[in-house]
Amino acid sequence: MSAARLSAMIAADPWRMRALAAVAALDLPQGWIGAGFVRTLVWDALAGLARPTPIGDADVIYFDPADPDEAAEKKIEARLTADCPLVFEGQPVPWSVKNQARMHVRNGDAPYRDVADALTHWLETPTAVAVRLNGSSAIEVLAPFGLDDLFGLRIAPTPHARTRRLADYRKRLASKPWAEQWPGLGIDWG
């Protein structure tokens, strides 16, 4: 049910649908948009905010072990910026593209198998959610930890963060104004 609810929320948001269509047009291997792109929409609705919360960037993730060069990501960002410049509430929103086939190196993990596996290594459960348009232009949801925390207005560490990166998780929480942005947000400091 929550996946259908999330899909309906995304489908009702023309800005997010435009971004999803731009990413789908690139036909990236396992291409998705996740993190704050999804989380912010849901939390704004749950908190009953009259104005949407700006997002810092549109996080595009994909998985291409054949081309793990960061330069490839920058080319995709440039193409998305040229083809689909994003402006949210009057502010430009940069595209942030990351090939999850190389991110294990930065995180000190074993190589990831695919985007779903990479998401299990992210720090927070409600952020480890991604969406995309499939070949039929239907919205697909990828949420390895489910959507309960996202729709419960809760933030919790992923199992990986809890066992291997709890200090990183806590540092990230401390740097974000999420509790002020979304009244009623439940925070599990781990």
Image (cartoon, grey):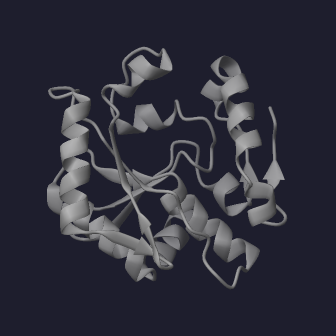
47 relative to 145, above or below? below
165 relative to 12, above or below? above
The spot of residue 119 in percent (x, y) is 47, 37
Residue at 37% of width from left, 24% of height from top? 112
Q: Residue furthest front?
A: 91
Residue at 30% of width from left, 28% of height from top? 101
Residue at 59% of width from left, 64% of height from top? 40
Residue at 81% of width from left, 36% of height from top? 189
The spot of residue 65 in percent (x, y) is 21, 26
Q: In this image, 135 relative to 14: left or right?
A: left
The spot of residue 83 in percent (x, y) is 18, 67
The spot of residue 44 in percent (x, y) is 66, 72
In-front residue for pair 179/115 = 179
One can see residue 188 in this view: yes
One can see residue 135 in this view: no
170 relative to 20, above or below? above
In-front residue for pair 76/115 = 76
168 relative to 42, above or below? above
* Residue 170, quarter of the rendered image: top right
Name the image quarter holding the N terminus: bottom right
